[in-house]
Amino acid sequence: MLSATGWGTLAGSAVLTAAGYAFGYGEAAVLGTTGLLTVTVAVLWALPAPVLGAERRITPSRVAHGDPAEGVVTLTNTGGRTRRSLRAVDRCGDGDITVDVPPLRPGTSHELRYALPTARRGRVPVGPLRLERTDPLGLARRMRPYGGSDTLLVRPRICPLPVLPSGRAHHVEGPASDTAEDGSLTFHALREYVLGDDLRRVHWRSTARTGTLMVRQMVDVSLPHTTLVLDTRRRAYASEDDFELAVDCAASVAYAAARSHFPVHLVGEAGPLLHTDGSGSDGEALLDTLAVVRRSELTSVAAAFDGLESHRGGGTLVVVTGTGDTRGLKAVDRVRRRFDRVTMLRVGAEAAATREVSGPGSGVPQLPVASLDELMSVWRRKAVR
């Protein structure tokens, strides 16, 4: 493929050659012919496809937005000739990242490193990698794809928070979930027997039906459950930055509970997003889920509370919304009596101007949050009450 310079040289040379021969200008004809030969040599120079091996990795593959992440490409010359004038072009999101490749002798490898964009949350597709070979004058180039695509997951940024105390009875030795010890209170599910399980919990009817020894799995319902409602409506936030801060706040609250192995129920205005049971990997799953949350065009957040009317009771309800449109937030009054503790975070730059935010939800504490640092401050004051 000719570059813009190559096409210009080709067109100008063709005009000079034609004019020189048509009007008898020998110098113009020679100059035009030289240009045509130059373009031909450039095409022949770039034509051979390099015989290379390419391997890409992303480090790390998951990162909080704003933190550094790198693409690392290892190129190996598997041919018998030294390869020069190469550039690696890697697709990243909606743009390209171009890195010059030094000369590669036969059998040698070179590692390319380049920064990946992490300014915004979400899945960032990386690849496929293309190797571009150009002539010394930049008139012609040839591009060839190598390898497949990878994904960089940019997750919300979180701050360390304590878990808000809730519940009428607390497990004196800490949380329990799928790995609960003897003494758990409520049936959770059936699972296969593993060495060390209490034989008194064997469910003989299921064992006879499946042919596999099955035991009852019990969980402690007195554990502090956190129900988190994240308002993603576009009209609820004054700007995209306010929405991103709201997602960071929701991620911080959810991760604090998951880090302590407490169950978390994450809900959006369109319905449940994720339910965790307190296992060791819940925090990562919550961050992965919140990494891909986007703003919605719904007009009301009321539907998010519909499913909470059947909540078993107890635990903490945290509502994260903006300082804009509050339509549907009054629905929190329908469900707040089913929880031991209810808190509403009003997130946005405008929250910095006041210490109290008026809005729906009679009797529900509403905390203004203009930054993650402010969230840490108001949350710790709330947690120790």
Image (cartoon, rainbow, N blue to C red):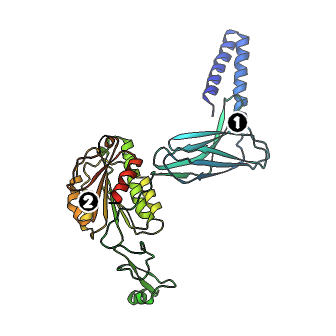
Secondary structure under the numbered disc 1 in the rendered image: helix
Marks 2 and 1, how far apart at CA: 63 Å
Q: Quadrant of residue 14?
A: top right
Instruction: Name the quadrant of the C terminus.
Output: bottom left
The residue labelled by disc 2 is 305
Of residue 326 and residue 384, the one placed in the foreground of this image is 384
Instruction: Name the quadrant of the N terminus.
Output: top right
Of residue 261 and residue 121, the one placed in the foreground of this image is 261
Secondary structure under the numbered disc 2 in the rendered image: helix
Q: Quadrant of residue 98?
A: top right
Q: Residues within 10 Å of mark 2 (few under 14, many from 20)?
A: many
Relative to 347, residue 141 above or below: above
Q: Residue 16's spot in the image, x, y percent?
A: 66, 16
Q: Nearer the viewer, mark 2 or mark 1?
A: 2
Q: Is residue 88 left or right of residue 367?
A: right
The residue located at (72%, 34%) in the rendering is 44
Q: Is residue 136 left or right of residue 8?
A: right
Q: Is residue 306 left or right of residue 57?
A: left
Relative to 47, residue 274 above or below: below
The residue located at (36%, 71%) in the rendering is 223
The residue located at (31%, 63%) in the rendering is 316
The residue labelled by disc 1 is 46
Q: Residue 278's spot in the image, x, y percent?
A: 42, 69
